[in-house]
Image (tube, grey):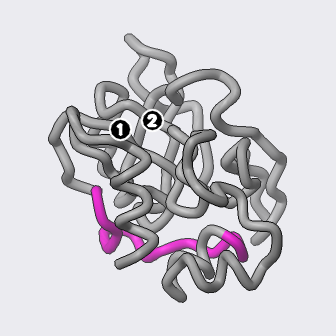
Amino acid sequence: MSDLPEARPADDAAYRERLDPNEYRILRESATEPAGSGRYLNQEAAGLYCCAACGNALYPSSTKFHSGCGWPSFFEEIRPDAITLHEDLAFGMRRTEMRCAACGSHLGHVFNDGPRDKTGKRHCVNGACLVFVPEGEDPAEAVEAHWNR
């Protein structure tokens, strides 16, 4: 979102100030929250999910589904250029990592076991990477409030 002040901090210190330690660990150091522990896992309200590091719009709630994997799951991003995909060979596995296209922060991984009647994709996203903006609320204000909590 271009209207957010300092949406993409200039340096690592700014991310450390903006994010809580768990968010920083996951978003900036590519960690993972324990399955079933993250915010928004059971969120069902209509709205928008934005990157907690920079405010970039990532997923509309209409693409969220219950996959049973333990993390919020989506079958499609809000627009094709919202995320970038990268090969991840960590832990002896071959996976596809997702990063926020605006700030490069780690979001999670995408798998090919999503709803077949949609995209067939499961975007498995760490809840700590997201800020949920209820329908009708201003995304810039909601993300700013999250940063200033």
Q: Quadrant of residue 15?
A: bottom right
Picture mark count: 2
Residue reaching furthest to the left: 45
30 above or below 48? below
Residue located 20% across and 50% down the image: 43
Per the rendering, the mark at residue 142 is none
Quadrant containing the N terminus is top right
148 above or below 64? below
Residue closer to the observer: 64 or 10: 10
Percent position (x, y) of residue 12?
A: 78, 79
Asked whether, in this view, residue 96 is left or right of residue 35, the answer is right
Give neighbour class at mark 1: few <14, some 14-19, many 20+ (Cα, 10 Å): many
Magenta residues, start to end: 28-40
Residue reaching furthest to the top: 117
Percent position (x, y) of residue 44?
A: 16, 42
First of labels 2, 1 by sequence position: 1
Give neighbour class at mark 2: few <14, some 14-19, many 20+ (Cα, 10 Å): many
Please tell me whether mark 2 or mark 1 is closer to you in this view. 1
Q: Which residue is mark 1?
A: 48
Residue closer to the observer: 2 or 121: 2
Amino acid under disc 1? Leu
Asked whether, in this view, residue 147 is left or right of residue 142, the answer is right
Dots 2, 1 in contact, CB < 8 A? yes
Q: Any magenta on residue 37? A: yes
Q: Determine the secondary structure under disc 1.
A: strand
Q: Any magenta on residue 24? A: no
Q: Quadrant of residue 96?
A: top right
Percent position (x, y) of residue 117?
A: 38, 11
Residue located 27% across and 36% down the image: 47
Residue located 73% across and 66% down the image: 9
Q: Which residue is mark 2?
A: 59
